[in-house]
Image (cartoon, grey):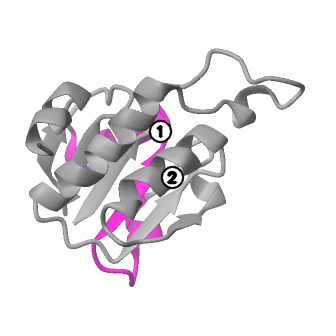
Amino acid sequence: MIWLLRHGDAEDDAPGAGGDAERRLTEKGRRQARGAGKALNALGADLKACLASPKVRALETAELACKALDLEAELDDRLRGGGFDPNDLAAGRGDVLLVGHEPDLSDAIAALTGARVKLRKGGLAALDGRLLHVLVRPKELKEIGR
């Protein structure tokens, strides 16, 4: 199973000259990320790896979500933006969580399943082959993880 998590709510602007890549999570974004980790546990996700975009907001999301799963987040530049193939990222790893950005996550879902969806900030999806198995909005993740 390939799990896709969009980064949580982030600052509008990064302090200093870091630009978009340096935008950090807001408190709401940190809550969303922790909630995603709890929900993944509650949903029985058997994750073997957690890969994140190197952009700060995605890495923070991955670190907070994966902490609940006793996993370390690994940086993968292919999740930075510009499109990726989830199957390439997951190859040989077993079930994996990919933490990234829009529109790349929704584009990946569409390419594999044909489903047209938009992941909200903090939203979660799971793909099993060409099947969109799970699609959860951030509010629902909060309820699942309770």
Give the residues in magenta: 86-114
Point 55% across, 47% down: residue = 60
Q: Are marks 1 and 2 in contact (CB under 8 Å)?
A: yes
Which residue type carries mark 1?
Answer: Asp
Q: Is residue 40 left or right of residue 25?
A: left
Q: Where's residue 142, x and y in %?
A: 18, 35
The disc label shown at residue 71, or none: none
Q: Position of residue 101 (x, y in %)?
A: 50, 37
Q: Position of residue 72 (x, y in %)?
A: 49, 70
Of residue 39 and residue 92, the one placed in the foreground of this image is 39
- Closer to us: 1 or 20: 20
Q: Is residue 95 above or below residue 17?
A: below
| Magenta stretch contains residue 105 | yes
Q: Residue at x 31, y 26 (%)?
A: 118
- The answer to whether 32 appears left or right of 88 in the picture is left
Q: Is residue 94 magenta?
A: yes
- Name, please, the residue furthest toward the right: 17
Look at the picture and state if 142 lies above or below 130: above
Residue tagged 1: 104
**Label 1 element class:** helix
Q: Which mark is residue 84?
A: 2
On the image, which quarter does residue 139 sit in? top left
Q: Amino acid at mark 2?
A: Phe
Is residue 113 visible to us here? yes
